[in-house]
Each structure stands twice: as structure tokens, then as C-alpha cells.
Image (tube, helix red, strand yellow):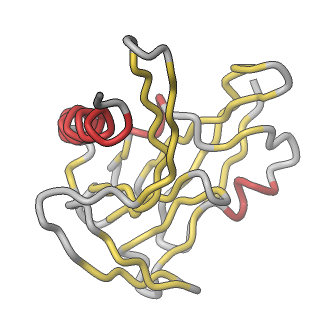
């Protein structure tokens, strides 16, 4: 499989690895983040971060850093955006697409939103943008559990908003 290896200005290495076709004509890429002192952020190793990036152009532009290199913004167009705290090994979603299927109605809904959780509010500056964060930074190892808690609550809200009788 093909990889695109990018050394960030803060010393971290972002390695985007091709994972194969997940939909007809759509090749997925995940992300391995490794720090200069053997740190790692592993959440994105199981996520589709890029699609169809054979030439590496998306990979080269996927992560923007703050001036001090502490924060990074991982984004790809309008479909998702994540804030990474490299110094503490933490991540927080900024923009995500949430899809939800309702069995009784046999219908899907999908929406792009800024997740809000636990009354979190923080501004983060990365080169070229200021991000208003409404989801708490979470340690990489704990993030899947916290994210799942949020999704359970959010999907219940979507049921009540879109599918109630």
C-alpha cells in the first residue's frame, strides 16, 4: 500500500496510509501521528481521513499548525475538522458529519455539525483560522469512549427531532 509521510514543523510525523477501496472508486487513507519523543495519537489510524489522494496533495495540506506548534487542525474540505493538542496528546472534533438510521421508518439522516458537549467553549488559533471549539479535548486513549457517549446522546436527539410521531 502507498503512504504519504509528512514531517510537520513541530517535529511530529504524519503518515497517511492507503487502506483500499471502501466504495466504488473511493480509496480511503488513514493517519498515523508520531511525536519526536515517541508520542503517538492513534485515533485516526482506524478512521477515513482522506479519499483518493494518490498524488499526496491532500495529505500535504491536511494539517495546519498553530504558530507555536502546540495545536493542529486536521481538515479535509467540508466533511470533517479535528483539533489536535500535540503537547498533551489530545483531540477534539470541530466539524463532523453524523449519520443516523432509524429502523422503524427505514430512513437515514446525515448532517454536518459542530459537536457541542459538556458545555465546553474554547478558541484555538491555527495558521489561517481561529477555531471555536465546543467539544472538550480528550486524551487519545479515552476519545473513542467519550465520542461514543456523545453519539448515543446525539442520535437520541435526532430521533426526537426528525422521527417522533
Q: Is residue 147 visible?
A: no
In this rendering, the answer to whether 107 lies above or below 28 is above
In this rendering, the answer to whether 55 lies above or below 46 is below
**Which one is in front, 100 or 76?**
100
Task: Identify the residue at image location x=43%, y=77%.
Answer: 69
**Which one is in front, 60 or 111?**
111
- Residue 92 at what x, y percent from top left? 32, 57
* In this rendering, position of residue 108 left or right of residue 54: left
Residue lying farthest left? 118
Task: Identify the residue at image location x=67%, y=59%.
Answer: 77
Quadrant (top left/top right/bottom left/bottom right) for the N terminus? top right
* In this rendering, position of residue 33 left or right of residue 90: right
**Which one is in front, 44 or 10?**
44
Task: Identify the residue at image location x=39%, y=72%.
Answer: 71
**Which one is in front, 6 or 83?**
83
Image quadrant where residue 153 sits: top left
Quadrant (top left/top right/bottom left/bottom right) for the C terminus? top left
- Residue 19 at what x, y percent from top left? 66, 24
In this rendering, the answer to whether 76 lies above or below 1 is below
Amino acid at each position: 500500500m502507498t503512504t504519504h509521510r509528512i514531517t510537520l514543523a513541530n517535529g511530529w510525523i504524519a503518515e497517511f496510509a492507503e487502506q483500499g477501496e471502501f466504495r466504488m472508486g473511493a480509496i480511503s487513507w488513514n493517519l498515523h501521528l508520531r511525536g519526536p519523543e515517541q508520542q503517538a495519537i492513534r485515533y485516526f489510524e482506524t478512521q477515513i481521513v482522506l479519499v483518493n489522494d494518490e498524488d499526496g496533495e491532500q495529505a500535504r495540506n491536511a494539517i495546519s499548525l498553530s504558530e507555536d506548534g502546540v495545536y493542529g487542525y486536521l481538515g479535509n474540505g467540508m466533511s470533517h475538522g479535528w483539533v489536535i493538542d500535540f503537547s498533551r496528546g489530545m483531540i477534539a472534533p470541530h466539524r463532523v458529519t453524523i449519520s443516523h438510521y432509524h429502523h422503524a421508518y427505514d430512513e437515514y439522516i446525515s448532517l454536518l455539525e459542530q459537536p457541542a458537549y459538556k458545555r465546553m467553549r474554547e478558541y484555538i488559533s491555527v495558521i489561517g483560522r481561529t477555531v471555536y471549539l465546543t467539544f472538550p479535548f480528550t486524551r487519545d486513549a479515552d476519545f473513542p469512549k467519550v465520542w461514543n457517549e456523545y453519539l448515543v446522546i446525539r442520535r437520541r436527539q435526532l430521533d426526537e427531532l426528525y422521527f417522533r410521531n
